[in-house]
Every structure is written in C-alpha cells, then in structure tokens.
Image (cartoon, rainbow, N blue to C red):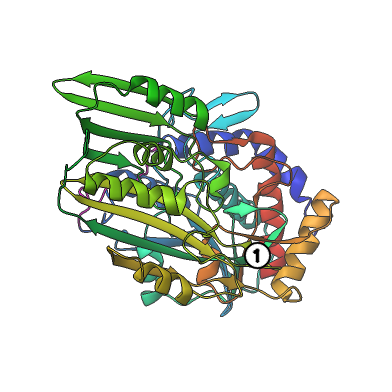
Amino acid sequence: MMVNWIEETEKRRDQIIQDTREFLKIKSVLDEEGGKKGAPFGEGIQQAFEHLLNKGEQDGFDSKNLDGYAGHLEMGSGDEIVGILCHIDVVPEGDGWSSDPYGAEIRDGKIFARGALDDKGPTMAAYHAMKLVKDSGVSLNKTVRMIIGTDEESDWRCVDHYFKHEKMPDIGFAPDADFPIIHAEKGIIDAKLRFKTPHSAEDASMTLITFSSGRRFNMVPDFAEAELKGADELEAQFNAWLKKDGVQGSIKRGSGVTKLQIEGVSAHAMEPNNGKNAGVSLAAFLASINLDGAGKKFAAFIKEHFYQDTRGKALRIETNDEVSGDLTVNLGTMQYGEGTGELGVNVRYPVTSSPEPVRNALESIDGAELILFSDSPSHYVEADHPLIKTLAGVYEEQTGEKASLISIGGGTYARSLKAGVAFGPLFPGRPDIAHQKDEYIEIEDLIRATAIYAQAIYELAK
C-alpha cells in the first residue's frame, strides 16, 4: 500500500494546529514543591502528561502510565520496538514576552508559546504522525512506542524510572532538535560550586548583601539583581558599565540599600553565545568597585572565569573535536548572601572527550567546594547505521535536500538509546529560539515535520 504522506498530513492541518495550541496552553513547568505520589513533578506537568495519554487512548493507542514519571502510547506488534522519545515539560517562561507564553497565539504563520519548539509542538507532530500511520491501515511488523518524558529539562528522572520498568527500544528518534539528522550529542555536565568567605568590610566602601541570577543550569540567565549597602554614589559608574557591556539595567535606592538590576538575553546553554548572561555582566561590574572581601571574591571569581568566556579557557578545560566542535560553558545560576555564594555551571564537552578533566578542574579551584557533579555521557551513532540510512532516505525524498549529519551541544532523549538520533523539527536556516522569549514554531514546519515523521515511522516499522 502506497501512502502520500504529505497529502495525508495536509488533510489534517487544521486538527494538528488545534491540538498543538491546546497542548501548549498547559503550563507544564517543573514544580518540585507541588510534587506528590502519581504527580512527582507538579500539577502542570501532570496535566499535560495525562492530556496526551488520554488523547492517545481516545484515538485507539495502547497507553501506560508509570507512576506519573513517564509513560507511553503504543501501536503495532512485534518484538522489535521503534521508539519516538518526546518530553512534555518545558523550561520556565522567563520575561519579556510579546504575548502570553501559554496563550499559543498565532502571528505571522507561527504559534508562539513556551514549548512550541521544545518539545510540545514537535511531540504533537509526532503524535499525529503516529495517528496517520495507524489510520492509514498499513501493516507494521514492529511495535511503535511514543515514550513520554516529564523531567527532560531538569534531571531526567523520568527516563531513569521508565527504563527500570520497560524495555529499551531497538532503534528510535527524538523530535527535539534539528533536521536533517543529529547523530552526535555532546556530554553534559551540571556542577555546583559553593564559596564561603567571612565578611570583611576593611577598606571597602560598599557591601554586597545579596546577588541572584538564573533559574536553570541549561539556560543563559536573562536577569540579575544585586543589593548593596553604602552604594549611594554608584549611578554614573553603573550606567557607564551598561553602555560599555551592551545591556539594559536600572539602579534603585531606598532605606540604605541600593538595588542593581541587569537584563540580558536568554538562550539555550548548548550555545551560550546566542544569549547575553545578565548575571555574569552584573558580577563583572561588581568586581570593578570597592566591595567588601566576601562580595568581592564572589564577583571577581565570576568575572575571571566566565566573563566573555564560554569555552572554558579560564577554567583550563578548553577542548574541541571535528565531530562535535567546542566544549561550551554556561554559568546558569548564581546566588549569594551572608558571605556564601553558589554557582551552577553547565558544561557540554565534545563526543571524543570525557568528564574527568572538567571534574578535576572544578575540584582544584581554591576556596570553592564542588557540591554537585552530574554527567550525561556523550552520544554518537555511526553514519552507516541502518537507522540513519532510513531517516536520511525519508528526509531526502520529502525535502529534496541532502540529509547531512550534524552534531549538537544540546542533549535529547535520543542519548538514552543505544541506537537513537535526534530528528527535527527545526529545518535548516530556521533560528533556534528554544528557551528564549517569544519561542515559536512555524506552522508550515509543524505540518512538514508531521509528514516526515509519519513516513519515518512507517519505514522503520514496516
């Protein structure tokens, strides 16, 4: 049976758009405090999770819920499993949106919402692709399983829980990055450093009371704030810094406390240079003024090791390879108060490198304690693997373009499979606005991706 996947997808255009918008309106951001049995990551994530499972059941898929951590929708039969690995959690929306981050507003042929590109829009494209294959009546000799994660943007506890109970798919793809095919993903390290320094105001005219910037290790912070005492004459100096560093900011005084704020540009940590780190900028300014000893040490460390350095040169961990490019460093969270500071660092290292040099470098920092170090190893699938050959054939047939292989600094669920790759939804030439304000997906790209996924599912499972 021959199916024109593009034509069949086009017939479902309005339904795909409607379902995607409905899904995006659910605020599925991690809420640790609101977690409970059956909903470990909070009400919003659980609502989105159950929404997708219920939709799948209504459309005739077999479903499974593993304690609210993860689940799947399934069709076909056979011992071999084709996995489609998606996640329904999103990063916090951040500031500066032009419309409601959960309004799923359509403007200029785009759907704007947090998660539109990462990963709820692509998840709905993959869902409709599965449904299209199912409704077409084609014969499948393998089981097709959409695995639904709920904690991808944080600690991957969903995947850990899922694979304790379920078999790993033999092959699969994650619709959570770029087209054509991503066959290499850098290793990802999350590390936290703690500084403790007794207060010392000797020969200092100003004291740093608090400093705060960043929400997640894997986001470039777009806002930073510091509170100081004794900083009544700082306005001209601070405004000069804002102009010099190319950022927006403000200074406010009241009750003996001066509050400094800087606005940066949010971006995904896989390429920090796509953003502007507000926290690093503010720390660099604070390092230039006459601060107390503890505050000065905290700010100076950030400036010395992270200001205008996203490649780990100052930390002496700089490296690269031909397959996946440069190691990158993002200072994602910064907190300071009462002489104690904590920094959350996200490092993405090339596929031919390892985490040990990074750990050794962080452990050797004078005056700092490494209190967290987690590593998600790099992932690489050889170019001649049958999975890649099949997906390349589908992509080239539908687009008429060469299915070149690429590597990324981002981490997708594909790395949880031995034979898994990231496959779309971002087409070549499109800007990557995941984790940024005004995140969107082009409606035409949503429809095109659905058709590609449908044919890919069929070709992998027939």
Residue 327 lies left or right of residue 62; in this view the side is right
Location of residue 306 in the rendering, given as x and y in whole percent from the top left corner: 46, 51
Is label 1 in a helix, a strand or a loop? loop
From this viewpoint, which residue is outermost toward the bottom?
79
User: Residue most toward the right?
Assistant: 400
Determine the image quadrant of residue 381.
Answer: bottom right
Q: Residues within 10 Å of mark 1 (few under 14, many from 20)?
A: many
- Residue 393 as seen in the image, left or right of residue 426: right
Three-letter amino acid code at disc 1?
Ser
Q: Is residue 70 visible?
A: yes
Looking at the picture, does residue 15 appear above or below residue 327?
A: above
Can residue 27 be found in the magenta stretch? yes
**Outermost front residue:** 203
State the quadrant of the N terminus: bottom right
Q: Nearer the viewer, residue 11 or 149?
A: 149
Up-down: is 25 above or below 161? above
Q: Is residue 452 above or below residue 364?
A: above
* Location of residue 209 in the rendering, given as x and y in whole percent from the top left corner: 19, 38
Closest to the observer: 286 or 107?
286
Start-end of magenta stretch? 26-36
**Residue under the image location 32 percent in, 60 percent down:** 192
Report which residue position mark 1 lands on. 324
